[in-house]
Image (cartoon, rainbow, N blue to C red):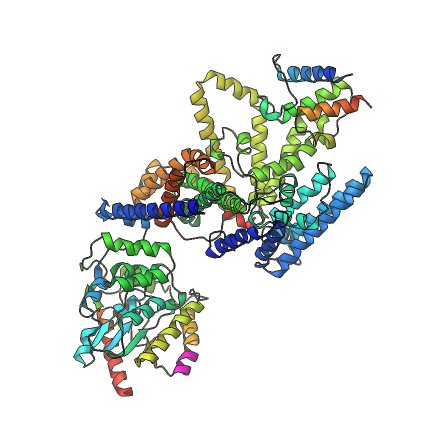
Amino acid sequence: MKQALKWLGWIFFLTVVLYVSALFCLCKIHYNRLPLFYLVMGDYAAPNGGHTYHASLDWSDTSHFDVVVLGASRAQRGYNTAIFDSLGIKMFNLGSPSQSLQNSRILLENHIKGGFIKEVWLDMVPALFKGNAFESTSDLIQNWAPSKTAFTIAWESKDARAINLWMKRLFCSNSTEQEGKGAYRRNGFVEVNASLSEKWVKEYENGNFGKESKGYVTFSQDAIDELQKIISYCQREKIKLKFIASPITVFSNRWDQMKMNEIMEPIVEQFQIPFIDYSNRTEWNTLTDFYDEKHLNAVGVRKFNLDLCRSMSSTQ
Amino acid sequence: MNNEQIFEKVNGVFRTIFKDDTILVTRETTAKDIAGWDSITHLDIITGMEEAFQVEITGFEVMNLNNVGDLLDLLAQKMSE
Amino acid sequence: MVFQSWFYFLFLLGLSGAQIFLLPTQRWILLLLGSFFFYSLTGWQPTILLLFTIIITFGSALWLGNEKNQGRRYKILLLSVTAQILLLSAFKYLGFFNDLVSGISHWMQSPSWVQLPLLMLPLGISFYTFQSMGYVFDVYYNIRKPERHFGHYALFVSFFPQIQSGPIGRSKEMLPQWKSITLPQWEMIRMALLLFLWGVLKKFVIADRLGIYVDEVYDSPQQFSGAVWMLILFLYTIQLYADFSAYSDMAIASAQVLGIRIPENFLFPYKANNITDFWRRWHLSLSGWLRDYIYTPLLFAKKKWKKWAVVYAIAVTFIICGIWHGPKMTFVLFGIVQAILLIFEMQTKEWRARLSNQLPSWMYQSLSVAITFVAISLCFILFRAEGLQQVKEIFIQLSQWEYSSVIDYVREKNGSIIIGLLFFLGLFLFYDEKISSVIRNQKENPKKLGLYLSFMVVVILIGMVIGKEQFIYFQF
């Protein structure tokens, strides 16, 4: 028995040493201007830094804000904090690419307290209900400045590769260089000032939309559970929670949208949470207000935010 | 026919089939031990034994032969009948 | 329950721990309970079916044991084997039957006849059917006496490390082990741990990574030229071996931890210098089963045909081998192609021997291994392709050969990944034997073993890809 324990101890020690050294080498040795790490790990290892990093540096747990926005890339690029500021709503945008409900919940629990934040707006898209795929954790694990939160996100994803990504932080440097799409503006908002890309213009002109016969998202119970946790947390902290479905293009899958609304209905009913649904509004034109099949461009965001603000104040 | 005579004859058949006069099988010899022992030669070995000893070896019996020793025992049993 | 999950790990640990409290002669009970628990997770219907197979074969064997009349014994065997084949066919080959029916009605231009509803394939049915059928054959051929202990027999058929995808065990090796089970020594447990991890590495780091490239090309065959296709075929050949041998290693390791020995399934197949040799190294438990229960009886039943008996036996055996893999024409074709290749090798034996004498031995060796590898890679298309239509497409693509396209492909895939992969593969192909022998050597220096283990864990942590949960051979 003692022999076995000694041997296992020896292995544990060796494994840690080898693991850390391997990651160190992978991060420090470059190929094609990128650390080897990315080539081994594949697509999900995005370069460090970028918009999410910038946002996490600007964020402070003790600053007062009227609204914090959570959600995926559509949230990050869809809620212009400058516009809301000018209309009297002090906002911070904590959206990040592929942010899942689990990630949102962890950010909420670690950084958003009732005494400092009045409202949380969750940007709702069907893809949120896919459950916590590993891809959705990669941006936050690598680029969210507070290490403890990033580690929680990695740990809760229950995927060994998430730990690799977190370890990478130790060896690869961060920079706020804007490598991702769009430009970082203020308090987390990322603005994309582009018109609809050629590819989607072509698809539009060929009429390649609205023809799907079924949805593509598999709605998972885990995701719904996470939503419940978000709701409970907001209730406890006495933070007002609002769901917002931002404008969509003709390319969005109607079935997935319907399914999401179906799932949301009873929850909204039970907890009396405002659900502001822009998905069936016709004022947003795919050709002028979006830069790809999912995301509003600067023009579309402006229209959306002004309209949202107006409807908020009218219901207040 | 005693066991030694059986053994001599069996070894003789092996030598003829493999065209090698130096072959000396033992009770433990199996297909792995002689180069070139495959299905065809396996077939030839059995039919060769049948001719040499004027007996019939059924498929049933072949299933139970694991090595040359089993073959010797089988032949000894047939010879005493 | 997948092998590579925490649940399985705990299950295995729990079982082996609990064995300490039982006497060696009682431990089989725990294993039987564990196996049925394991299998019941797939549903009560498959479990009933398993029980049914166990009872039928147990009964047939006892009956065979009591019956002296050869003619009647043959009838009993026929009954038992037919029942098992019908059962297997009902689940596995119904799709085949449906295709046939719709094919005929299409040809006759009449409305489609009744299509039988497809049933879900129970886990491991191809494997446990063959395992229990082998036992009945053993009793019929008087290789062993019928097992009188129902519990021991039930465990033989249902033993959980083997039931999913083999290795197919023989009654002669397995049944005696249940009588008294000795718990493994520390060295053996250590070895099992290493073997299991090696399986995890082969599956998640090698097989699944290769799968990414292979899947992409198989999903859109027409987009890739012949040269790229050839590369992908080689990668698939390695993926299949890594995947299946990984499963087998995990199965062997699991059994070891419980004090049981199950047969090896592979013997470095890609070192084979011809197809005949290949089948002495690939999926040993299946090829051995086919050789002993199909090939040998057929061969000696027709021994008067001499050379033609061999041709006949090979043809029938390999067609059955093809069909066993699944209800697709591609698998049947696979069997036929193997038979043709083997018969060809048989006919050209002397010619090839003369050739080997004329060439320097290293040249002849390397050519043989290379040609065999290419032939096998081409045959494995039949394993991976969707159907005969896709096979045709692939061969058309293969005829459009441009060497430059491979360079483009490699560059597009970020040159270093593919190069790194190929390097790793090279290591794998040549050192698999060395690694295998090190892992299996109980007397190896513990510090060295510890180093290998840590190294493997790190490679797994950094290199693993989670794509497919399932092993390729699960579908059989």
Q: Does residue B43 appear in the picture of this structure?
A: yes
Our reading of the magenta stretch's main secondary structure is helix
Horizontal and vertical percent position of residue C451: 37, 41
Residue C83 sits inside the magenta stretch: no
Work out which residue is located at the far top of the displayed protein and give it: B21
Horizontal and vertical percent position of residue A133: 38, 61
Relative horizontal placement of residue C101, taking residue A31 as reference (left or right): right
Relative horizontal placement of residue A35, taking residue C264 as reference (left or right): left
Relative horizontal placement of residue A228, taking residue A144 as reference (left or right): right
Relative horizontal placement of residue C382, taking residue A155 as reference (left or right): right
Horizontal and vertical percent position of residue C41: 57, 59
Question: In the image, what residue occupies the spot 32% across and 44% down?
Answer: C417
Horizontal and vertical percent position of residue A162: 33, 57
Tell me where the magenta segment starts and ends, as one range.
Answer: A266-271
Vertical position of residue A31 compared to residue A48: above or below: above
Vertical position of residue A118 compared to residue C64: above or below: below
Q: Nearer the viewer, residue A227 or C97?
A: A227
Vertical position of residue A48 compared to residue B27: above or below: below
Work out which residue is located at the far front of the displayed protein and give it: A2
Q: Nearer the viewer, residue C371 or C45?
A: C45
Q: Does residue C112 appear in the picture of this structure?
A: no
Q: Nearer the viewer, residue C302 or C167?
A: C167
Q: Nearer the viewer, residue C224 or B80?
A: B80
Vertical position of residue B9 compared to residue A50: above or below: above
Question: In the image, what residue occupies the spot 56% across and 27% down?
Answer: C345
Q: Which picture quadrant has residue A80?
A: bottom left
Residue A269 sits inside the magenta stretch: yes
